[in-house]
Amino acid sequence: MPSPRTQYDYDLFVIGSGPAGQRAAIQAAKLNRRAGLAEKKSVLGGVSVNTGTIPSKTLREAVLDLSGYRERQFYGLSHTVRQRITMEDLLARVDTVIRHEIDVTRHQLLRNRVEVLPANAAFLDPHTIRLDNVDGSGQRSITAAHIIVATGTEATRDPHIPFDGRTVLTSDDILRLDQLPRTLTVIGAGVIGCEYASMFAALGVRVTLIDTRPRLLPFVDAEIADTLAYHLRENRVTMRLGEKVKGVETIEDEAGRKVRILLDSGKQIISEKALYSIGRTGNTSKLDLEKAGLEPDSRGRIAVNGHYQTAQPHIYAVGDVIGFPSLASTSMEQGRLAVCHAFSVPATSVPELFPYGIYTIPEISMVGRNEEELTGEGISYEVGKARYREIARGQIIGDTTGLLKLMFDTGSRRLLGVHIIGEGASELVHIGQAVVAFGGKVDYFVDTVFNYPTLAECYKTAAFDGINRLGGVCGFGGLE
């Protein structure tokens, strides 16, 4: 029987060049396997680099810088770095970062000798893929011992919504706006909806946020989510929670084209633009998965087991195409783990300790369990809190409303979760992540000396706060 190395064209073939696909292909190359990758776009990086994570987070930084939002605590609500901010101003920074990230992605793949093929991929059978060159120059088929589907997602488009890319938008259309609207309605208060709602609100746009759920981001600690809601309201965001959209239509008046949103409750909302952000759908409709013996769900997602194997053991799926948590960081790790499993290379990871970063204004980050989860599990826990206003660094940077929460077991004092809202949350969370991962106690933060003045001091303040709630004595314990 011929070995896989002679039987197939590739040891591993990846469909999609986003974070998951890129990491998978490079991991295979590092293991000295013949790796190939197909990308249907004219540029590499997938949604993450071109329309998703990188552009939206760069846009957020441009908003914060040009609006002077961070300095308003010192100079007043009217403070702005640039009097009139245009989409051109914001997108200039975005374009620069995207070009750089595309170049970095290409360089990493090429230097690791991954064969990059600009082509649309579709299955012919479980081991064979048809490649249609994006330049129209023809097609060919390749075979692979192992295949990884990392095609990501696209914005979900309800057929009853009149999307036109100018007035009624998806998140993929935001980067094509020619000017900032005065008013914006965001339908869907998930992560993407909340991020864009907070960005446009920081620019002075009157934003209305609609969602059928009674509160924002139900997977986030309730106190943190409530704090975000408070910040949004402070920035004049009107929230219509627990409301269902009945219809969306475009209208014309003397001021031009607008959008009218009709709610089941009878309310009407009229705004210049509407952003429809009700989830994302897996990019699987053109893969001919049925020829590989696979079937996606109603949202185009592919079911996998704990090793990211599909119903066909040699075919793996990773990244956003498999659903929650749909984060670039977790997608990269999934790609690495899938390849290691495919080639029987030992690799471990702790998915329950993956950190989450939500880039609203202010940003949110968390790791471990929240209060609702601990209560539901019947775990006796205590909470320690530190507010940025108690920390010198919080005063220096002008963020006096940030909050860091520690959850720990009341008996063992082992750290169970860290939840943060405020400037630098997505960086700050990694300190707590390390302590949770190593089974450390909340006492670790009491015993540790942090640089002064830094936001990291919040950990010590929160630890003292939590231990004092127990009536305990500080200074014992540390990492076990």
Image (cartoon, rainbow, N blue to C red):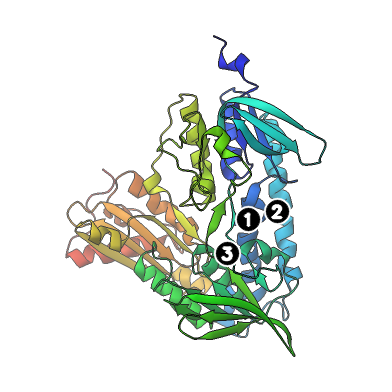
> Along the line of sight, which residue is nearer the eye, 126 or 462?
126
Which tag, 1 or 2, sits closer to the chain's start?
1
Which tag, 3 or 1, sits closer to the chain's start?
1
Q: How many marks do you count on the picture?
A: 3
Spot the residue most to the bottom: 254
Q: Position of residue 89 (x, y in %)?
A: 74, 69
Q: Secondary structure at mark 3?
A: loop
Residue denoted by label 3: 158
Between the C-alphas of marks 2 and 3, the distance is: 29 Å
In this orientation, does residue 401 appear?
no
Mark sitting on residue 422: none
Mark sitting on residue 54: 1
Horizontal placement of 418 versus 324: left or right? left
**Residue at image x 29%, y 48%?**
440
Residue denoted by label 2: 98
Q: Position of residue 98 (x, y in %)?
A: 70, 53
In this orientation, does residue 446 appear?
yes
> Along the line of sight, which residue is nearer the eye, 65 or 93?
93
> Along the line of sight, which residue is nearer the eye, 219 or 64?
219
Between the C-alphas of marks 3 and 1, the distance is: 25 Å
Q: Secondary structure at mark 1?
A: helix
Looking at the rendered structure, the kind of residue marked 1 is Ile
The answer to whether the residues at label 1 and label 2 have Cβ atoms under 8 Å apart is: yes
Q: Residues within 10 Å of mark 1 (few under 14, many from 20)?
A: some
Q: Position of residue 452 (x, y in %)?
A: 44, 62
Q: In the rendered view of the protein, which quadrant contains the C terminus? A: top left
Q: Position of residue 367 (x, y in %)?
A: 39, 54
Looking at the rendered structure, the kind of residue marked 2 is Ile
Horizontal placement of 90 versus 284: left or right? right
Which tag, 2 or 3, sits closer to the chain's start?
2
Looking at the rendered structure, the kind of residue marked 3 is Asp
Q: Tell me: residue 282, above or below residue 271.
A: above
